[in-house]
Image (tube, rainbow, N blue to C red):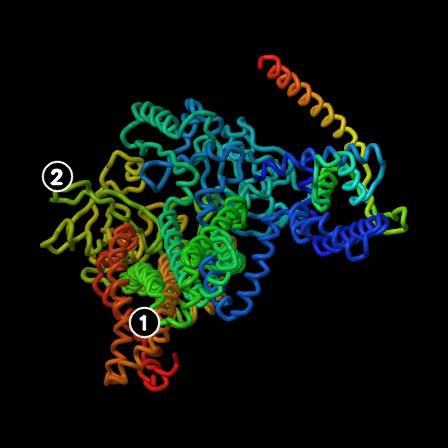
Amino acid sequence: MSTKTDVMQGTLGLMVLTTLETMGPLHGYGIARRIEQISGNLLAINYGTIYPALLKLEQEGCISSAWGVSDNNRKAKYYRLTRAGRKQLQESARGWEQTKCILERFLTLGEESS
Amino acid sequence: MRTLRAWIVRLCNLFKRKQQDREFAEEIESHLAMHIEDNRRSGMSQEEARRNALIKLGGVDNIFEEHRDRRGFRWLAELQRNLCYAARILWKQKALSLIVIGILAFASAANTAVFSVYNFLFIRSFPYPHSERLVYVGTSGGYGGYDSKSHDRYREENRSFEAFGSYNPDSRNYSRQGEARTTSILLVTCDFASVFQYQPALGRGFLEKEENPGEPKVVMLSHSFWQREFGGSVSALGETLKLDGEAHTVVGVLPSNADFPETADLWVLFQKGQGDTIRGYGRLKEGVSQEQAQQDLTRIHKSMMETRSMNEYLAPPRIQSLRERLFGNVGSTITMLLFAAGILLLIVCLNVAGIMLARSESRSQEMGIRTALGASRAGIIRQLLTESLLLALPGVLLGLLLGQFLLKLIVLNVEAALNFDMPSWVRLTPDIPFLAFCVVLTGATTAFFGLAPALQAARVNVQHSLHEASSRLSASGAKRRGLTILVVGEVAFAVVLLVGAGLLLRSWQKMLAVDPGFRADHVFTFNIKLLPSAYKGRDDSARFFERFIESLRQLPGVTAASGSNVLPLGGYNQFVFDVEGVAPNPAAGPEPAILMRWIFPDYFKTMGVTLLSGRDFNAEDGRAKDSCVAIVDQSFARRYWPDADPIGKRIRIRAEDNLQGLWRKLAGLDRWMTVVGLTRNVAHYGLDRAIEPGVYIPYNKWRNSQMYILVRSTVDPAGIVGPIRSQLRKVDPDVGILFPMTMTEVVKRSTLVRRVLSIVMMLFAVAALLIAVAGVYGVVNYTVSRRTHEIGIRMALGATRGQILSMVIGGGARLMIVGAILGVAGAFAASQAMRNMLFGITAFDVPTYFIVGAVLIGAVAAATLLPARRAANIEPMRALRSE
């Protein structure tokens, strides 16, 4: 049970980092919205789960936060990618890429043999 | 790295909880507001928009909880919560908590104080580089030492020591710019300082060539002497000091920590051939064991003795570790005290466990509710342990303070009473092992008294405990059994302590009741040392003492005055004697070493020693050149002439194969001495030691440059010191008084260790007894209040008050009796271990056990009377209605 959440949080963290890289500084609601949009219906998450993930990333120094004002003149907490976060993103992305490649090979191998 | 950062942030967050809660709430609020706005824009109604936003967000409480966990540490937060809760609970029962903390503090004080001493004696290392390699070199005879020739051979031929030095404490008359005074010195060989690696604070140490006779005599100043006499000035170097009239040049100043093995004002360098009874310290080479060094020196000793005449024979060398040398005789005492303190702590823990158990009883409903609401067993145990910790921690901390205070008090007392300068490194201050001990103490007590109630509470049956209010009669049997076991344990351990303390107290009492053989009251004593330069021969010094003692007799209030080489209860001077007409009998074991004292006339009158028959020495005996007389004590007479009158018999110092044999001839004591008197025995080796035979000879048959003077007066000794000093100035203004003391003080000092030991043990035992009584009282009281209903029924059915009284008292007495039986069994075992600390009684001393029994009966009465009366006063009607 807990390992599943961990995996989820790991991927969620990566999604948050990519979102912040492409979108620039953004608030929690915006990030959650964006992740939902990008993933389409494939990934239905509660928006609330984004916050523990954000906190974890912040504690690890990957992102930083500050209160700001939204487009609609609303007070909101904005998250921004830090240098350490950018580095982390590159590393994780490379890792995922590799995993994907390896898995792909396995999967195509499976198709060929069947 | 990133994880570490996260940890630190989370740790810091512990202190910002409220603020962060608020901030997160704001963030969620703004999240919802934005979401609602978006939803409205896509055409939902306000109501629908809000509902959708909340659903999308997920359970708000869950998010908060998860966020909070992520922020700090769950267990730390729980600990914090537990601590707050525990503090509240304990605060609600202030009186009880304070009592618990108080008794814990007392027991920890006892433990920390005793452990401080134990730590110093057995664990801490001495403040010398590689102090584990330092050893003491003495002779196997115990008293005395080797001579300077042996020192030279040991130093030259040993293969075991990195450095080897010898020393001899002494005193000299010191004068600088006219004024004369007695000063303490340490005669040392040139490499003595290097054994301890003392570096001179100023100037230089001694050189080997300066040991050669004929070289100028040199001296080093102790740091305090340098400060005192020279104001710490560099100009002290090269100064000339007169010691016993001889000029000595100051070559250096010792560091301030050079107060071991003895504190002395000056270190004077031995010159070759000087010194007869010297001892030494050595620094072993790396990797050389004490046994190897022992064999090494024994080998040198053997080869040395082969070339010596029988008269110059010396006892073989004996090596001891520093620890053995310094603390060998107090180790077992301290270990015993540590055990006693441990037992006391155990009793306290049992008691507190009982209190906690009784309290957890009254809280079982609370536990039931908590369990019903989903608290885990582990959670409840953690909660209860936190409460225990919250009691144990202040208890131990308070105990630490109290213990340091106690320790200071004991040390000050001992120091003052022994008139003993502790080396500066005798520090009983806390250090790492000490702190570790305290941590273990806290942990152990917490676990000990907290765990049992916690486990019991965690076993709580929800149904049961919630029902309990309505079924008080049946419940809690197990708990009462638990309490009973704890209290029986308390009583048993208290009995062990009581018996131990009782045995020691009785030994002390027996010791005080010993007739020392002399009357200590109204006797004042001091030591006088004459300069060899001013008093060359034995006759010169004899004349001085004769004149001085005679002048003391003239003082008003003085009824008798005399002198002797050693005081009772101190000093050894033993020889083996030949007795005319009595053949040595090797089968009867070794001949006893006999204490020989040389005394001035009137000694027995001054000391209050009864002369049983014959006569005292007179001035003629002292002056006689070609004859010698002696006085023996009963113990001597009984050994050699059990059936005959000793007067007129003859004895002689045996030419044993020891160094004293050489002196026998020099002293003119190689001839037969005629016994002219018989005295009562004197407890010379200590009031609690066996009485050994002794012989007295007239004063100038031996070296007599140093003597103890004794004055018996009808007036207060304090008032007599002044007149004594002025008489001394009249006889010789250059001589000073050493070690002034009353004989009462001498006796008191000899009983000091036993006194301190029995008082401390008694303190522990009384505390243990009080705690155990409180425990029994608690159980009996608890039982009565639990059985109010039952007692009411009994009374309604016709039980008399007397029956109820005896039922309650009987319950308390049963606890005591079972505890006492177990305790006596334990005490038997414990008293066997402390057998060699007892005096005048056996380990199965009937009076001690009798007194302990009587005390226990009193304790039962104290513990049960109040609850019993309460029980007897129960009114049946009200008791039955009380349910």
Residue B859 - label: 1
| Residue type marked 1 | Ala
Report x, y in % for residue B312. Answer: 31, 31
Q: Nearer the viewer, residue B87 or B532?
A: B87
Report x, y in % for residue B789. Answer: 33, 78
Q: Please, what secondary structure does the residue beneath circle 2 have?
A: helix
Q: Nearer the viewer, residue B456 or B836?
A: B456
In the rendered structure, the answer to whether residue B451 lies left or right of residue B489 reads right
Residue that appears at 79% across and 35% down = A19
- Per the image, the residue denoted by label 2 is B587
| Residue B604 visible (yes or no) | no
Q: Nearer the viewer, residue B112 or B748?
A: B112
| Residue type marked 2 | Ala
The chain identifier of the residue carrying mark 1 reads B
Q: Could you tell me which quadrant the N terminus of chain B lies in?
A: top right
CA separation in Å, label 2 and label 1: 55 Å
Q: Is residue B635 above or below residue B135?
A: below
Report x, y in % for residue B537. Answer: 40, 44
Residue that appears at 25% across and 47% down = B594
The chain identifier of the residue carrying mark 2 reads B
